[in-house]
Image (cartoon, rainbow, N blue to C red):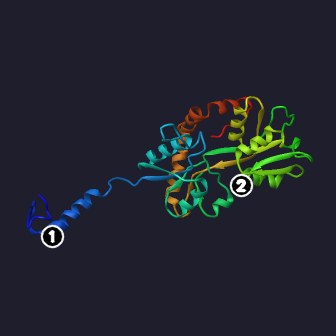
Amino acid sequence: MNFFNATWVSLPCFKRLPVNAAALFCVFLLGACSRPSGPEPLRVGMDLSYPPFETIDASGRPTGVSVDLAESLAAALGRPLRIENIPFTGLIPSLKTGQIDCVISSMTDTPERRESISFSEPYLSVGLALLVPSTSSAQGLEDLDQEGRTIVVRQGTTGEVWARANIRAAKILAVEKESAAVTEVLQGKADAFVYDQMSVWKNASMQSGKLKPLLQPLRKESWAVGLAKDNSDLRERINAFLRGFRASGGFDALGEKYLSDQKQAFREQGLDFYF
């Protein structure tokens, strides 16, 4: 029946209603039916450009360590998951404006970031390491921080911040892109590249013996889930999840699934793995 063409309408439990009242009641019913049922989605911000942690697979779906972690977190909270793909520089602003509930995107917990957001307990520990030519005799920073040496860093990274605070004698060269820093070392224009252990290991593996990683950490950093400062309830829930996920072997499984080669390399060098 077309409510808007009828003069009177018969509805269950209602006596004959004028058309305007019937129309309003219909709109009310449709509105009630269209309201979403169940819990609100957990909106997780990620920059899906950092494999194997957060990236997009060949079919266009998010994949990686952070994605699996977010899926497990959402399931533990009893909420559907919605991943928002946001450039890294936009993650904290999106969190502060309420566009997302949390950030799981290889984000380092730093004092500077804590001025504007809060963090969960750390879930991963990664160190700054050195990428050097395979022919280099350097065993560590003490062999490289010398007059006449050049150490390349990527602009805006914690590697640059650390290098400027700790390197005394060598020249520091800052470049915009990771690939440019690697090229500087490959071409002999820089003696080492200071970057995170994961990327150092990956770049050495990709260069067919031309580069080697010195994975002994110069400094350790922690990754954590980023949250709005006033969201203490979600922070407590996430911390409880992280403890349980670790105790149940969840992080060990992620390491074997996505980082097995790196895990083996760390084991051979007697280094602690990330998780």
In this image, 89 relative to 166: left or right?
A: left
Instruction: Name the residue located 47 percent from the left edge and 38 percent from the top edge.
Output: 59
Q: Exactly how many numbered labels are in the figure? A: 2
- Identify the secondary structure beneath mark 2: loop
**In the image, which disc is placed on residue 156?**
2
Is 128 above or below relative to 236? above
Counting other residues with Cα less than 10 Å from the Cα at mark 1, is it few (<14), some (14-19), or many (20 or more)? few
Contact between marks 2 and 1 (CB within 8 A): the answer is no
Which is more toward the observer, 22 or 118? 22
Residue 38 image position (x, y, % from top left): 34, 53
What is the quadrant of residue 50 in the picture? top right
Q: What's the distance in space between the residues labelled 2 and 1, CA to CA?
A: 62 Å
Which is more toward the observer, 49 or 67? 49
Q: Which of marks 2 and 1 is nearer the N terminus?
A: 1
Q: Which amino acid does label 2 sit on?
A: Gly
Q: Which amino acid does label 1 sit on?
A: Ala
Residue 117 image position (x, y, % from top left): 59, 61
Whether residue 1 is visible, yes or no, is yes
In this image, 98 relative to 191: left or right?
A: left
Residue 162 image position (x, y, % from top left): 77, 52
Viewport quadrant of the N terminus: bottom left
Whether residue 15 is visible, yes or no, is no
Counting other residues with Cα less than 10 Å from the Cα at mark 2, is it few (<14), some (14-19), or many (20 or more)? few
Which is more toward the observer, 269 or 152? 152
- Identify the secondary structure beneath mark 1: helix
**In the image, which disc is placed on residue 59?**
none
